[in-house]
Each structure stands twice: as C-alpha cells, then as structure tokens.
Image: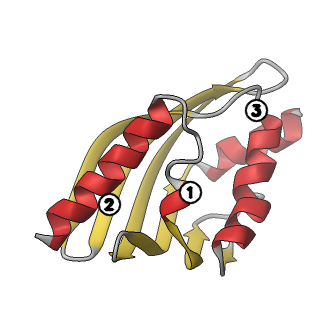
Amino acid sequence: MVASVNKQLIRSVFEAWANGDSKAFFNVLAPNVEWTVIGTGPVSQCYKSRQAFLEGAVNPLSEKLAGPIAPTVENIIAERDTVVVQWSGQAKSKAGLAYNNSYCWVMGMRDGKVLNGVAYIDTALVADLWRSS
C-alpha cells in the first residue's frame, strides 16, 4: 500500500513538472533531505538539505540552461518506502547546445516526502555544460 501511494506521488509530481511546474518535484523533498549526486562533476556531492541541494545543484544547472528541463519518465519502481525513477531530461543550454541527460533517482520516502535520494546521472554531460557556458 505505501509503495503504491509513493509511486503515484512521484508519478504525479513528474507529470506536473512535464506540464510546466518545474518546482513540483522539489516541493516533495523534505527540508532536511539528504540528496547525493554520484560522480565527479560540478554538482556531485552529498547535500544535507533541500536548500543546499537547490543552491548547490539545481539552481546552478538551471542558470546554464535556456529553459527548464523537460522530463520524460521511463520507469518507476516502488517497494515499501523506496521509489526508483528512471527518466530522461531534455533542454537547451544558453549557448544553444542540446542537454539530454539520463537519470536514475533512488529515493527513500515517508509521509509523502522524500527523505533521502541518490542521483545517478551523466556527470560528464553536466561538466560539458559548465564548460560551454
């Protein structure tokens, strides 16, 4: 039961994001979320709060893009309090280059909030975006 509720919540926030509400997903992050971006790129580290994640990764990435990332969900898997979403995101950089990344986010949830997450992304693509702008 919990798994299906969590899965539907994540599906709905990604649908809202795809329909123009680019903050929908970030609104379900707990204020004290621990979010880790795997890799060695400019945003790769462990963020200890929603604010730190927004300021250290989301906002700097958004500043390099001409518009918000358009997400396409490929798969959502849920078991107990864990939800995994595989998705792709498309955008253009301010320099006019394509930013098409693949993501796999593994999230621990409770009471409708994401408490922790690990993001697997193409950090080389993110590093290229930093260099190009």
Q: Are marks 3 and 2 in contact (CB under 8 Å)?
A: no
Q: Residue at x 84, y 22 (%)?
A: 95
Q: Is residue 20 left or right of residue 1?
A: right
Instruction: Give the number of callouts.
Output: 3
Q: What's the distance in space between the residues labelled 3 and 2, CA to CA?
A: 26 Å
Looking at the rendered structure, the secondary structure element under dot 1 is helix
Which label number is shown at residue 35? none
Q: What's the distance in space between the residues labelled 3 and 1, CA to CA?
A: 18 Å
Q: Is residue 116 above or below residue 76?
A: below
| Mark found first going from the N terminus, 3 or 1 | 1
Splitting the image into 4 quarters, where does residue 55 fall? Answer: bottom right
Looking at the rendered structure, the secondary structure element under dot 3 is loop
Which label number is shown at residue 65? 3
- For the residue pair 99 and 32, the one nearer the viewer reads as 32
Q: Is residue 59 above or below residue 35?
A: above
Q: Residue 12, image x and y in percent?
A: 34, 45
Which label number is shown at residue 26? 1
- Amino acid beneath label 3: Leu
| Quadrant in which the N terminus is drawn | bottom left
Q: What's the distance in space between the residues labelled 2 and 1, CA to CA?
A: 16 Å
**Category of crowding for the residue at label 3, using alpha-carbon neighbours closer than 10 angstroms: few (below 14), some (14–19), many (at least 20):** many
Residue under label 2, please give it: 84
Q: Is residue 59 left or right of residue 35?
A: right
Q: Which label sits in the foreground, 3 or 1?
A: 1
**Category of crowding for the residue at label 1, using alpha-carbon neighbours closer than 10 angstroms: few (below 14), some (14–19), many (at least 20):** some
Q: What's the image's color scheme? A: secondary structure
Q: Residue 109, image x and y in percent?
A: 36, 74
For the view shown, which residue lies furthest in the left direction? 1
Q: Residue at x 65, y 33 (%)?
A: 68
**Category of crowding for the residue at label 2, using alpha-carbon neighbours closer than 10 angstroms: few (below 14), some (14–19), many (at least 20):** many
